[in-house]
């Protein structure tokens, strides 16, 4: 049976920051280049960097079934997630709304983990998940009220959510014995190949090379390399459900970062969402203990 520990703050904090910064940076990127082209370039560069790291560190490379499982996890975690998110943002979904949808990952992952992996959900973790949902609803409600409408392109973002949740569980179930460094390289390379093929049939062109280039570099370093590596480590330490609980804090912090980057001023709903999401993170990642059995 899979056992898990609490995720330390030194690992949780970078994950929240890296993911939160990726949404406004991605919005800037898709405003300057076609979304699937941007995603393909990002994943290709990330795969190159991760491969170099794995080779330098003499990581053991997956073979046979392990290679196939790594590729499948990459298609879910990277191709579906980033393709859906960037496609949605290019179609008009705001960065903060994208972050809110993806932050439903803890709820979906925990539910799937309970059914598929038979993980136990304690009262505290259930409360943390409930607060995470409430944080999303409060912040999303404020966004919808401000904009006065719901963008149907959110369906693309929902595809990204599904891929992210399924990818975390697949990683936990089938990739536990694979070296994180080489596994991340294989996952990213497989996703880059698929998204690259899709980009061949995409319309549009780069309108601002400097903005697109800076966005890609930031996304590669903080997202595809550092962010994904930290997330995979968190899955290995605490399990997919507990690791995904960290993303309850991403939407409000995304809104805060979007203030200077995109000119979006945080609302009262965002401030309340920060408080709820932070509490949800604490509860969702806390250590669970059991009373000793009596003899």
Image (cartoon, rainbow, N blue to C red):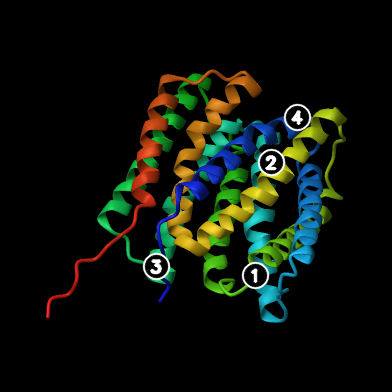
Residue in front for this viewpoint, 49 or 121: 49
**Residue that numbered label 1 is attached to:** 179
Query: Which tag, 4 or 1, sits closer to the chain's start?
Result: 4
Residue 115: assigned label: 3
Q: Residues within 10 Å of mark 3 (few under 14, many from 20)?
A: few
Report which quarter residue 68 is drawn in: bottom right
User: Helix, strand, or loop for circle 3?
Assistant: helix
- The reply to whether residue 52 is visible in this rendering is yes
What residue lies at 58% left-to-right and 27% top-to-bottom? Answer: 257
Image side of residue 68 versus residue 244, left or right: right
Residue 73: assigned label: none
Q: Residues within 10 Å of mark 4 (few under 14, many from 20)?
A: some
Structural distance between the alpha carbons of marks 1 and 3: 27 Å
Query: Which tag, 1 or 3, sits closer to the chain's start?
Result: 3
Query: Which tag, 1 or 2, sits closer to the chain's start?
Result: 2
User: Helix, strand, or loop for circle 2?
Assistant: helix
Query: Which tag, 2 or 4, sits closer to the chain's start?
Result: 4
Structural distance between the alpha carbons of marks 4 and 1: 36 Å
Q: Closer to us: mark 1 or mark 3? A: 1
């Amino acid at each position: 049976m899979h056992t898990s520990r609490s995720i330390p703050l030194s690992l949780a904090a970078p994950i929240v920051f890296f993911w939160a910064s990726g949404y406004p940076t991605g919005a800037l990127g898709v405003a300057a280049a076609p979304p699937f082209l941007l995603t393909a370039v990002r994943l290709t560069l990330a795969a190159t960097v991760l491969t170099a790291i794995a080779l330098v560190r003499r990581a053991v490379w997956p073979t046979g079934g392990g290679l196939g499982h790594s590729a499948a996890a990459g298609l879910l975690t990277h191709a579906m997630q980033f393709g859906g998110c960037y496609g949605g943002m290019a179609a008009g979904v705001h960065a903060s709304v994208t972050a809110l949808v993806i932050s439903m990952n803890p709820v979906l992952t925990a539910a799937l983990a309970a059914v598929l992996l038979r993980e136990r959900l304690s009262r505290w973790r259930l409360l943390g998940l409930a607060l995470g949902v409430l944080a999303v609803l409060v912040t999303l409600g404020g966004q919808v009220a401000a904009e006065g409408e719901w963008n149907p392109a959110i369906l693309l973002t929902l595809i990204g959510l599904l891929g992210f949740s399924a990818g975390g569980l697949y990683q936990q179930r089938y990739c536990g014995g694979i070296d994180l460094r080489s596994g991340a390289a294989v996952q990213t390379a497989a996703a880059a190949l698929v998204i690259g093929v899709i980009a061949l049939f995409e319309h549009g062109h780069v309108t601002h090379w400097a903005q697109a280039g800076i966005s890609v570099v930031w996304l590669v370093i903080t997202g595809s390399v550092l962010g994904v590596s930290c997330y995979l480590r968190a899955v290995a330490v605490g399990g997919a459900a507990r690791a995904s609980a960290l993303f309850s804090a991403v939407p409000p912090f995304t809104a805060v970062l979007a203030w200077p980057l995109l000119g979006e001023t945080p609302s009262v709903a965002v401030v309340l969402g920060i408080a709820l999401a932070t509490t949800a993170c604490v509860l969702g990642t806390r250590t669970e203990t059991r009373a000793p059995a009596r003899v």
